[in-house]
Amino acid sequence: ANFETACAAPAFLRLPAPLVSGLLADPTLNAREQAVFEAALNWALAQPHPSPRKASGSRGAFDGRETLLAHVRFPLMAPEALVLRVLGSEEAARSGVLKDMATEAVTWQAVAPLLRPQVRLRFLSQTQCTPRVPVASSKPGAAAISAKAGGA
């Protein structure tokens, strides 16, 4: 809940990319993966685009920021959120990387847990298939986001 509250604050959208990347990559982050995806998406949408427009004139939020997606553990999302919110999003239509990762996550979820080691991953990393392990609040967490962003 603290992660989601902190990421909903306007200050989160002003954080520098390395800080956002580090936060989303944290293996001890105590958050639902859908919230991690939403945080990455909202942050990316709020940033100026680092890459030129495609010939079609449309740009996805993750164009030039694909590394953020590597921190989202798509296979661990609720299946309905993965299909409806991620694969059904405009961003999946614009970002081949996002669509590939989410599609592979659906495949991974469809396989029985004992057989998952046999699934050949092309777009996802093994880390993205591994649950985060939150620790007792020894880290400042959401308070650090607000403090490093300069308030609120």
Image (cartoon, grey):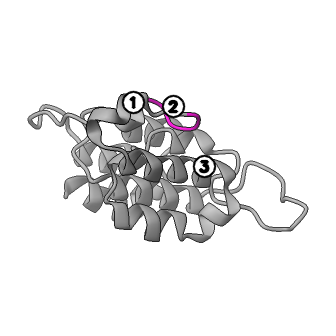
Quadrant of the snapshot with the C terminus: bottom left
Quadrant of the snapshot with the N terminus: bottom left
Q: Where does the image place residue 94, in percent across and percent down from the top left?
A: 69, 62
**95 is within the stretch colored magenta:** no
Quadrant in the rendering for residue 45: bottom right
Element class at badge 1: helix
- By secondary structure, the bulk of the magenta-drawn segment is best described as loop
CB-based contact (under 8 Å), mark 1 and mark 3: no
| Cα–Cα span, label 2 and label 3 | 13 Å
Residue drawn at (37%, 45%), measured in percent from left and top?
111
Depth check, mark 1 against mark 2: the one in front is 2
Q: Nearer the viewer, residue 86 or 119?
A: 119
Name the residue beneath numbered marker 3. Answer: 100
**125 is within the stretch colored magenta:** yes
Identify which amino acid the numbered label 3 is placed on. Asp
Residue drawn at (39%, 30%), measured in percent from left and top?
127
Q: Which of marks 1 and 3 is nearer the N terminus?
A: 3
Q: Nearer the viewer, residue 104 or 90?
A: 104
What residue range appears in magenta? 122-126
Name the residue beneath numbered marker 1. Answer: 127
Depth check, mark 2 against mark 3: the one in front is 2
Identify which amino acid the numbered label 1 is placed on. Thr
CB-based contact (under 8 Å), mark 2 and mark 3: no
Name the residue beneath numbered marker 2. Answer: 120
Identify which amino acid the numbered label 2 is placed on. Arg
Q: How crowded is mark 2: few (under 14 residues within 10 Å), some or many (20 or more)?
A: few
